[in-house]
Image (cartoon, rainbow, N blue to C red):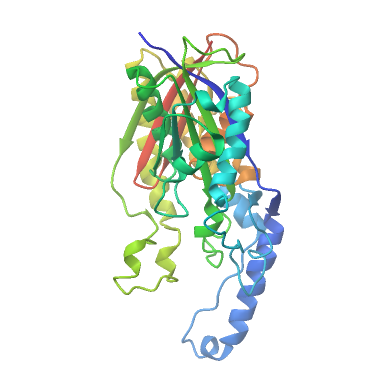
Amino acid sequence: MTHVVITGTGLYTPEHAIDNAALVAAFNAWVNSENEQHAGAIARGEREPLAPSSSEFIEKASGIQSRYVLDASGILDPQRMRPKLPQRGNDEPSIQCEMATAAARQALAAAKVDAADIELVIVACSNLERAYPALAVEVQHALETSGYGFDMNVACSSATFAVETAANAIASGSVKRALVVNPEICSAHLNFRDRDSHFIFGDACTAVVLENSAVAIADEQFEILGTRLVTQFSNAIRNNAGFLNRVTDSDPLALDKLFVQEGRRVFREVCPMVAKLITDHLASLELAGSDLKRMWLHQANRHMNDLIARKVLGYDPSEAQAPIILDRYANTSSAGSIIAFHLHREGLVEGDIGVICSFGAGYSAGSVVIRRL
């Protein structure tokens, strides 16, 4: 029987960080400008005044205190309020390729694997900067890996879905080593003029090396005991940007082309779905919540993570049991649970069991149960 192990992870963190205070200052400057511009309509009752934001509101609603972004100046400009990323020529590495290779090289070094020995590359993320050629093939070219590559998108669950896909390829014998990368530029699809969501996302990229245990030589290895995925269609989280916008004559700058969600509905519907996914998955492996030493959950909202962990474990988790990174990284979509795994797996000893779990638009959710070797 082939055993699949995770042997290395990597993390690319952008150099620019925006704390809540700076983000709120830019948002409120825009709010004040808009309210002044439409003061007459507001006074006549024809228009509701825009409400300001605050650091206290953001942290209470989400647990987020800061976020990393590829460009801060454009976001913090009240006249622009979106990142400013210059277009690159076709002969230059794409932005996501640069992010992916930076994270991948860390993961390869940790795994003690040469890029040429990677036979499968999967780029899995919520938003791809182009339709084709596949980002994964560009990453394959940049790293000089062998084999093949492809892109996939299951929103915030892209990483766990890709890990299962890569693990299945290894288990089947078609490849011995695979690389999963998750280059997320979430700031590019966020509406920084929406009070309820302008604080949610940050940018980052993660990478994971998976291998057949028979060829793995890394100092630190985690055996994949099982994976389980679930999807359930919902419009509660949506982004309508796409190549058909041009032919349907819809406004490419309309608000529905950016991130839109019904936050309370998402909380109410996703939390029980994810808790059941993990609990049922553990039961299928003859395990229970009490067997988990660590839960690396998707980093979207502190309250969601606390509730899911409490349902699975049966008690309030400690910071060590269910680590939080969204306070400084915010929601990085598919990268979130992998960032948590990358940064918070110290102290685990041989035999310790943990779960990497993602959840998001779709709805989609993925569970990867692992054991420290």
Specify whether 26 is left or right of 287. Answer: right
Q: Residue 256's x, y, as percent?
A: 40, 65
| Quadrant including the C terminus | top right
Residue 96 locus on image (x, y percent): 54, 48
> Is 327 drawn above or below residue 354 in the view shown?
below
Residue 133 coordinates in the image, percent (x, y): 41, 49
Q: Nearer the viewer, residue 43 or 287?
A: 287
Residue 308, horizontal then vertical, whole percent? 45, 34
Question: Where 19 sits versus 139, above or below?
Answer: below
The answer to whether residue 76 is above or below residue 149 is: below
Relative to residue 45, is residue 247 depicted above or below? above
303 or 154, which is in the foreground?
Answer: 154
Furthest-front residue in this view: 91
Q: Nearer the viewer, residue 261 or 62?
A: 261
Image quarter in which the N terminus is found? top left
Q: Residue at x 55, y 28 (%)?
A: 115
Quarter of the image where one finds residue 71: bottom right
Residue shown at the point (40%, 49%) measured from the top left:
266
Figure quadrant of residue 162: top left
Q: Is residue 314 among the parts visible in the rendering?
A: no
Q: What residue do we see at 61% from left, 64% from top? A: 84
Residue occupying image coordinates x 40% and y 27%: 166
- For residue 183, say whether it is visible: yes
Looking at the rendered structure, the number of numbered marks drawn on it comes to 0
